[in-house]
Image (cartoon, rainbow, N blue to C red):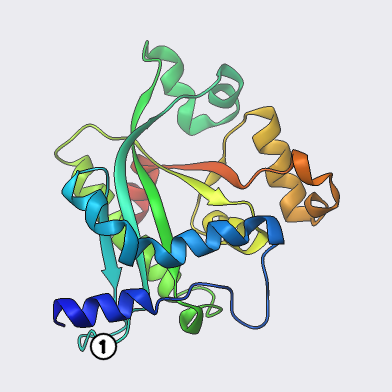
C-alpha cells in the first residue's frame, strides 16, 4: 500500500463493538481514541520512540486494516500478597527488586468487521504476534511480563482473561475486575468507576506454553 492508501485506511478505521453491542457511555471517548490513534498519533509515537505500532491485515493483499497494536517498554510492581498467592511469582519474594521489566500493550484494537469471532479470531492472532515479539525480546533483553491497562468493559476483560492475563491485586483494581465480570460494575456511582483495569501475564509461563 502507498502512504496515501495507508492514511486512508487508518482514517477510516473503526473499532466500535460489533453486533450492536455498545460500551458504557463513560468509555466512548476511550474507544474513539483507539479508533483515531493510527492516523493522528502513531507516527509521532514511533518517531519519538514512545511505542512501536503495528498494523494488522487479514491477508497478504493488505487492502483492508483488520486491527493494530502498539508496544512500549515499561515495568510492573507487585505487592507481597500478590506474590504470595501466585505460585509463579513466589520466586520473586527472594529477589530484591522493587519493579520488574515488562512490555506494555500501549494500544490494541480490532476493526468492527473482524470482531466477535471468538477463539482464533483477529484479536487472538494479534496476541499471538505480541507473544512472539515478547519471546524474541525475552531471549535478548531482560523482560518478564506483558502488561496492559485494559478497557474496563466486560468484552475486553474477557478477551485478556482468555489469553491468560490476570488482574493486579490492588484492592480497587481487583474489586472492579470481579464486578465487571459478574455484571454489577455499571450499577455503581459513575464517579467511582475506572476506565481501565491493570492486568499482566508472565512471559516465562507463556514461553513454556509456546515451546
55 relative position to 125: left or right: left
Count residues near mark 1 (Cα–Cα under 10 Å), then give few for <14, some for 14-19, many for 20+: few
Position in image of residue 1 (x %, y %): 16, 83
The answer to whether residue 128 is visible is no
Position in image of residue 52 (x %, y %): 24, 52
20 relative position to 111: left or right: right
- The residue positioned 50% from the left and 24% from the top of the image is 78
Q: Is residue 96 above or below residue 21?
A: above
The answer to whether residue 96 is visible is yes
Position in image of residue 159 (x %, y %): 55, 61
How many marks are shown on the rendered structure? 1
- The residue positioned 26% from the left and 88% from the top of the image is 63
Q: Is residue 150 above or below residue 174?
A: below
- Work out whether residue 11 or residue 169 is closer to the camera in this orientation and state it: 11
Q: Quadrant of residue 177?
A: top right
Q: Quadrant of residue 10?
A: bottom left
- Work out whether residue 80 or residue 41 is closer to the camera in this orientation and state it: 41
Q: Is residue 104 above or below residue 95?
A: below
- The residue positioned 30% from the left and 44% from the top of the image is 72
2 relative position to 24: left or right: left
- Work out whether residue 64 or residue 86 is closer to the camera in this orientation and state it: 64
Quarter of the rendering occupied by the C terminus: bottom left
Residue underneath mark 1: 63
Mark 1: secondary structure? loop
- The residue positioned 47% from the left and 28% from the top of the image is 89
Q: Residue furthest top?
A: 96
Position in image of residue 166 (x %, y %): 55, 43
Amino acid at each position: 500500500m502507498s502512504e496515501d492508501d495507508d492514511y486512508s485506511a487508518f482514517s477510516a478505521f473503526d473499532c466500535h463493538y460489533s453486533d450492536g453491542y455498545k460500551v458504557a457511555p463513560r468509555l466512548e471517548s476511550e474507544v474513539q481514541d483507539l479508533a483515531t490513534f493510527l492516523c493522528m498519533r502513531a507516527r509521532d509515537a514511533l518517531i519519538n520512540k514512545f511505542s512501536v505500532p503495528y498494523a494488522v491485515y487479514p491477508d497478504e493483499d493488505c487492502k483492508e486494516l483488520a486491527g493494530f497494536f502498539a508496544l512500549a517498554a515499561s515495568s510492573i510492581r507487585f505487592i507481597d500478597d500478590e506474590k504470595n498467592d501466585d505460585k509463579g511469582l513466589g520466586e520473586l519474594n527472594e529477589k530484591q527488586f522493587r519493579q520488574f521489566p515488562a512490555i506494555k500493550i500501549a494500544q490494541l484494537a480490532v476493526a468492527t468487521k473482524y470482531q466477535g469471532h471468538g477463539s482464533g479470531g483477529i484479536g487472538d492472532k494479534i496476541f499471538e504476534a505480541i507473544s512472539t515479539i515478547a519471546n524474541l525480546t525475552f531471549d535478548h533483553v531482560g523482560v518478564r511480563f506483558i502488561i496492559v491497562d485494559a478497557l474496563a468493559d466486560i468484552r475486553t476483560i474477557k478477551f485478556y482473561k482468555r489469553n491468560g492475563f490476570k488482574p493486579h491485586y490492588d484492592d480497587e483494581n481487583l474489586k472492579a475486575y470481579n464486578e465487571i465480570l459478574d455484571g454489577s460494575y455499571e450499577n455503581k456511582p459513575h464517579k467511582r468507576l475506572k476506565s481501565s483495569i491493570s492486568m499482566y501475564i508472565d512471559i516465562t509461563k507463556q514461553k513454556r506454553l509456546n515451546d
